[in-house]
Image: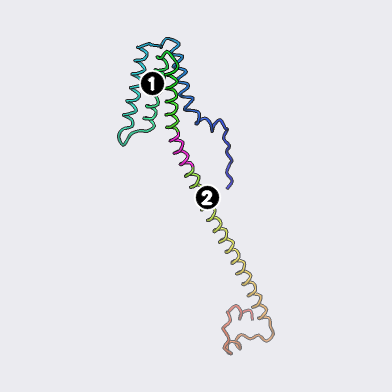
Amino acid sequence: MNEPLIHSHWLTAAAPKVAPVVATSTVLILGRIWNANGAEHSVGNAALMVVLAAGAATAGAFASVGRSGDGVLAGTAFATAGALTLAGVAGYADGWSLPILLWAVATAVAYGIATRYWRTDRRDTVAYERGTAVRREEHAHVARVETIRGRTQIEVAREGSAYAEALAQALTARAALPGFDPPTLEAAGLPELPSADRDTA
């Protein structure tokens, strides 16, 4: 079976790899913009970010407990808590040292989590491709067996038809021989001829 060839653009393939650093860098930039617009050393803004980050972390904790925990929801909540923390620190701090340090840690953690999901996705993709190849090979084998069986049946039918035609010609030629007498042959102990041969004779 011919399958369409799918070539993904290099940007499509690279996008998931750069997503964590783009996300953390965006949060850092927004935090520094917020810092330049009055959030530096603002206790009220810092308290707001602490409350929001703690709320997101609490939501993630509740979403991850129990057998019915939702891993995607918990991961999203924890990521939101981390982003709020980074934005809060970047907005409150007066220098770049602490925000850059926190950005580096957040980026490393984001890549660590993403790598785990990338490996799982890669394993699932490889398993699917192997299963598809096995099924395709099994179907091809069945198709080859059925093709061989069909050809064999055609050959047997052709041979049977040729044999029947040759037998009919032989019987016709025997019946046309001079002095051919079926009762005499039967009396001599030869096999009984079919009734069609007698009618022909």
The dot on residue 27 is: none
The magenta-colored residue range is: 115-125
Q: Report helix, strand or loop for mark 2.
A: helix
Q: x and y percent of residue 124 in the render?
A: 46, 41
Residue 108 image offset from top left, x and y in percent: 44, 28
Location of residue 39 (image quadrant):
top left
Residue projecting furthest to the left: 66
Depth check, front residue: 69 or 85: 85
| Residue 121 forms part of the magenta stretch | yes
Sequence-first disc among 2 and 1:
1
Nearest the eye: 84 or 137: 84
Q: As shown in the figure, which amino acid type bears the numbered disc 2?
A: Arg
> In front: mark 2 or mark 1?
1
Looking at the picture, tell me which residue is in the foreground, 80 or 39.
39
Crowd rating for badge 2 (residues with CA inside 10 Å; few <14, some 14–19, many 20+):
few
C-alpha span from label 2 to label 1? 51 Å
Residue 185 position, x and y percent, is 60, 87
Query: Which label number is shown at residue 85?
Result: 1
Is 172 left, or right, of 118 in this rendering?
right
Q: Is residue 91 above or below residue 158?
A: above
Q: Which residue is at a point 57% across and 44% down the rendered structure image?
A: 3
In what element is the residue under mark 1?
Answer: helix
The residue where tag 2 is placed is 136
The residue that appears at 61% across and 79% down in the rendered structure is 197
Q: Amino acid at mark 1?
A: Thr
**Residue farthest to the front, as pictured:** 97
